[in-house]
Amino acid sequence: MYEGAIQDLIDELGRLPGVGPKSAQRIAFHVLSADPADVNRLATTLRKVKELVRFCTICFNVAESEQCRVCRDPRRGNEVLCVVEEPKDVVAIERTGEFRGRYHVLGGAINPLEGIGPDNLRIRELMARLSSGEVKELILATDPNTEGEATATYLALMVKPMGIAVTRLASGLPVGGDLEYADEITLGRAFEGRRAV
Ligand SMILES: [Zn+2]
């Protein structure tokens, strides 16, 4: 245990995901010995991300204006909508270059153990978007794990009666993992080979 500001920094860093006590200490001492200009830039970036970044009012991807880059792009089609759990999944799918439609970011997956039900996700907003009748296919690109599968099953049951084709990414994705960990080629193939559910 250190005294004052350095311990405060270690404590704050230790609250970050994936940063254990040893890493927190190492980063804190790195900051202590770093150039003041570098530390200022980091502090400014941290403040700016909270000030400037918000969620797209249409798809809930991260955005720096009312709408995200994907929603603002007039060259993308409105007929295919891809449902993902988190903004990082949008990035993973964009990297494949296989998809030219729009997204809807749920903000997580159904997880009864953590008390996350359909009402805690942006499912109501999804249904509102689908009610316009423009979407012909809904791709369920939730993670290939228990929570992602449960969410996909729930959405399929809700959406199929609306007469919209519902598809799920093809197998081949690492089961139990996160979409973002799949490499571009595997994820691209899973996209191409998506099947009706
Ligand atoms: Zn958007």
Image (cartoon, rainbow, N blue to C red):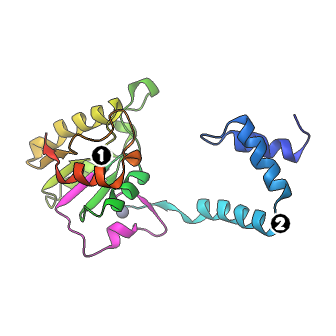
Task: List the residue tagged with mark 2.
Answer: 36
Local crowd size for mark 1, using a 10 Å CA cut-off: few (<14), some (14–19), many (≥20): few
Split into quadrants, the picture shows ligand 1 in the one at bottom left
- The magenta-colored residue range is 59-82
59 or 174: which is nearer to us?
Answer: 174
Question: Against 74, is 156 above or below?
Answer: above
Identify which amino acid the numbered label 2 is placed on. Answer: Pro
Residue located at (31% from left, 37% from top): 144
Question: Against 133, is 147 above or below?
Answer: above
150 or 132: which is nearer to us?
Answer: 150
Q: Can residue 60 be seen in this snapshot?
A: no
Is residue 3 shown left or right of residue 138?
right
Judged from the image, the secondary structure of the residue bearing numbered disc 1 is helix
Question: How many callouts does the rendering have?
Answer: 2
Q: Quadrant of the C terminus?
A: top left
Q: Quadrant of residue 118?
A: top left
Q: Quadrant of the N terminus?
A: top right
Task: List the residue tagged with mark 1.
Answer: 124
